[in-house]
Amino acid sequence: MNPSSLRDACLKGRVVEVMKILENPEFDQHNAADERGATALHWAATNGCTEVCAALLCCARFTAHDAVEQDGATALHLSIQQGHVSTCAAILASPRFTAVNAQTKDGDTALTLAWSCPAAFALVLKDPRFTAHDAANQHGATALHYAASEGLDCAALLASTRFTAHDAADKWGDTALHLAASNGHAEVCAQLLGCARFTAWRATNAVNATALAVAARDGRRDACAVLMRADWSEAETSAAADHVGVVALLRSSG
């Protein structure tokens, strides 16, 4: 019996077969990895095989719980990237998995990768072992940047005492408010403006644009309406009003 047998069983989610292999006294390749550095736990997590992940994490002879692939991804990263919420939950529930705060080679944490899966985002944020709330990836983007860009509910992250990067800007100078405004997420804009710890509401990005100017440029009328509640200067309002499509809104709000 070789490692490929375990890999095939993990990829196909065959729990009984995986258990037989793991318990076989002649099998000694529990922690074997493929050419990318992926272990049985990576394979199972990628395919959303929750029961297989749970079995591996409970197996005394499997010790590669925190192993990373060549790009630095743990099994948790992979389960989140693929949107496997139950698998993510199973991995986080295991005390043997300790790489909760691990970052990939691109600097992504489980939280920054969870932008496309709100349920996984909530799971990671609630985990008491997760402390990398402020981590930024190679683009300078934090979990708040991604959440705001995708229109996720940011209330829990903004309220977390472990999160302090409210005003962080990415490598293009965009704050979370710029991204929420650009994508027309008015509710997120309101959450950010209503957060006392978010103070960069009038910050300008690499092209010297405020969030209001970005929303106006991209024709995001609802976001503009929310942003106009802030105390903009006449010059800032006028600059935003130059953009076609929101002129009437901005001028009537001024």
Image (cartoon, helix red, strand yellow):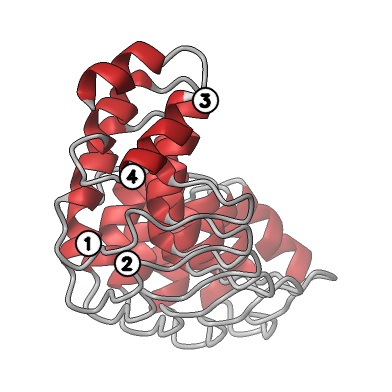
Question: How many C-alpha atoms fall within 10 Å of the one at disc 2: few (<14), some, or many (≥20)?
Answer: many
Q: CB under 8 Å between callouts 2 and 1?
A: yes
Secondary structure beneath disc 1? helix
Q: Amino acid at mark 2?
A: His
Q: Which residue is mark 4?
A: 118
Q: Earlier in the sequence, mark 1 or mark 3?
A: 1
Q: Which residue is mark 2?
A: 166
Residue designated by label 3: 218
- Characterize the local packing of mark 3: few (<14), some (14-19) or many (20 or more) Cα atoms within 10 angstroms: some
Label 1 or label 3, whichever lies nearer to me, is 3
Q: In which quadrant of the rendered image does the N terminus lie?
A: bottom right
Please give the name of the residue rendered at 42% of the width and 67% of the height, measured from the top-left corner: 55
Residue at coordinates 28% horizontally, 70% vertically from top-left? Answer: 93
Disc 2, SS: loop
Q: In this orientation, which residue lies closer to the viewer: 175 or 92?
A: 175
Closer to the camera: disc 2 or disc 1?
2
Q: Which residue is mark 1?
A: 158
